[in-house]
Image (cartoon, rainbow, N blue to C red):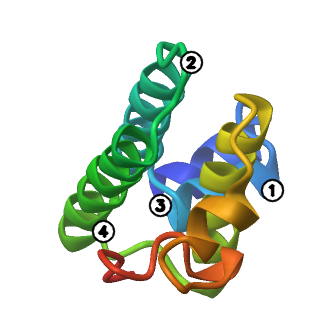
Amino acid sequence: MSEEAEQVAAGVLARGEAHAAQLWPPRFTAEVDEVLLAYEREIAALDEPSDEAVWAAVERAVLALNDVNVEHGRIETEEREDLCEHLDAVLTRAGVDVDALTGRRDADRSELTDEWREW
């Protein structure tokens, strides 16, 4: 019996949590959270975010997520969509007009991460 199955049988781990741990191992989740937190802090620290500063922050976050995915191979369609939405939402909360930002590069808002994203 696997360790997770034993934990579920013992009532220490919920069945749904066991499945989630298989899909997103704690180390993978921690590394993604670390990247996202660094990105959130960087964007929040920008007093008057210039396009250059915002694009540089997006690039750093996406490249770091590329590295995490190379190591773990866990970013699939649903995760990709969630991560892209989160990166966009952080900018929006910081007052960045993402449509205008991407438009100035002749891109659509949905292409915010496309230049660097490998996942």
- Name the residue: 44% across, 34% down: 39
Q: Mark 1 vs mark 3: which is more N-terminal? A: 3
Q: Nearer the viewer, residue 85 or 6?
A: 85
Q: CA distance from mark 3 to mark 2?
A: 43 Å
Which mark identifies residue 44?
2
Q: CA distance from mark 1 to mark 3?
A: 15 Å
Nearest to the eye among marks 3 and 2: give it.
2
Mark positioned earlier in the residue sequence (2 or 4): 2
> Which of the marked residues, 1 or 4, is nearer the chain's N terminus?
1
Amino acid of disc 4 = Asn
Looking at the picture, which amino acid does disc 2 mark? Answer: Ala
Name the residue carrying label 3: 2
Q: Nearer the viewer, residue 78 or 93?
A: 93
The 10 Å Cα crowd at callout 1, few under 14, some 14 to 19, many 20 or more, is few
Could you say whether the residue bearing mark 3 is in a helix, strand or loop?
Answer: loop
Q: What is the three-letter code of the residue carrying label 1?
A: Gly
Among numbered discs 4 and 3, the one appearing first in the sequence: 3
Residue receiving disc 1: 16
Task: Say which amino acid is labelled 3.
Answer: Ser
Residue 69, numbered label: 4
Vertical placement of residue 84 versus 116, above or below: above
| Among the 4 quarters of the image, the one containing residue 10 | top right
User: Is the residue 7 above or below the residue 72 in the image?
Assistant: above
Q: Position of residue 79 (x, y in %)?
A: 61, 70
Q: Helix, strand or loop at disc 2?
A: helix
Circles 3 and 2 in contact, beta carbons < 8 Å: no
The answer to whether mark 2 and mark 4 are in CB contact below 8 A is: no
The span from disc 1 to disc 4 (Cα, nearest Å) is 23 Å
Q: Is residue 117 visible?
A: yes
Label 2 and label 1: CA atoms lie apart by: 34 Å
